[in-house]
Amino acid sequence: KVPGEKIVVFSYYLQHLETLEKSLADFDPVTVHGGVNDKQRDAAVQKFMHDPKSRVFLGQITAAGTALTLTSARHAVFVDLDWNPANHEQAGDRIHRIGQTREVFLHYLVAGGTIDEDIVKMLQEKSTTTAALLDADEQSAGLLQQRRESRNIARLALKVAMGEAPAPSA
């Protein structure tokens, strides 16, 4: 218990969130899941962000992992793993947003000898593949731009040589 410290907990499963809500009642948790309407969601976020007694935000990763600002916390805990690494990144970004002035920590609960270890490996492979594809895409875009510029220079040089365009001035 660090005075004033807040934490965001993400789970894919509603049952986990309900269990945690009961277990963490002393910390006045708020919960956002797929069954929460927009008004309830906004009220939960406002309470967590501004009420010093509300120290735990419980969020279903698919419902609370995007479009929220939870910068009053600097720790996010993932109770279980989603199959998509982008969902983890998006959820972690809820506390690592503009306005966050403190260091942010992301914690993943992975039990040894369980399927979670395999999921972690798969998530790492997916992240590596995605990064490589995005990097290759950027490199391809740069090469295409260079080729276009080279063609344009060659066309201009040909037009100048044929007297169809004035020579560029220095």
Image: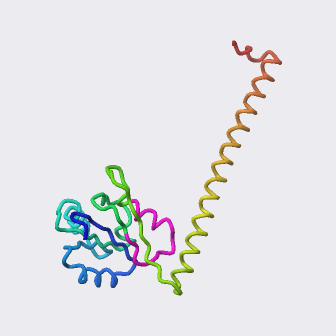
Q: Nearer the viewer, residue 98 or 138?
A: 98
Q: Is residue 14 above or below residue 53?
A: below
Q: In this view, does 81 lie above or below 15?
A: above
Which residue is drawn at the image coordinates 70% and 33% (left, top)?
149
- In the rendered image, residue 146, in percent from the top left (x then y), is placed at 71, 37
- In the rendered image, residue 126, in percent from the top left (x then y), is placed at 59, 68
How many labels, in total?
0
Quadrant of the drawing holding the N terminus: bottom left
Q: Which of 152 and 43 is in front in this view?
A: 43
Q: Is residue 141 above or below residue 122?
A: above
Colouring = rainbow
Which residue is drawn at the image coordinates 30% and 60% (left, top)?
70
Query: Is 79 placed left or right of 164 in the picture?
Result: left
Q: Magenta residues, as a range? A: 77-93
- In the rendered image, residue 116, in percent from the top left (x then y), is placed at 51, 81
The residue lying furthest to the bottom in this view is: 113
Query: Is 34 placed left or right of 85 in the picture?
Result: left
The magenta stretch spans residue 79: yes
Q: Is residue 71 above or below residue 165?
A: below
The magenta stretch spans residue 148: no
The residue lying furthest to the right in this view is: 162
Which residue is drawn at the image coordinates 25% and 83% (left, top)?
23
- In the rendered image, residue 43, in percent from the top left (x then y), is placed at 20, 65
The residue lying furthest to the front in this view is: 2
- The quadrant holding residue 121 is bottom right
Quadrant of the drawing holding the C terminus: top right
Which residue is drawn at the image coordinates 38% and 66% (left, top)?
65
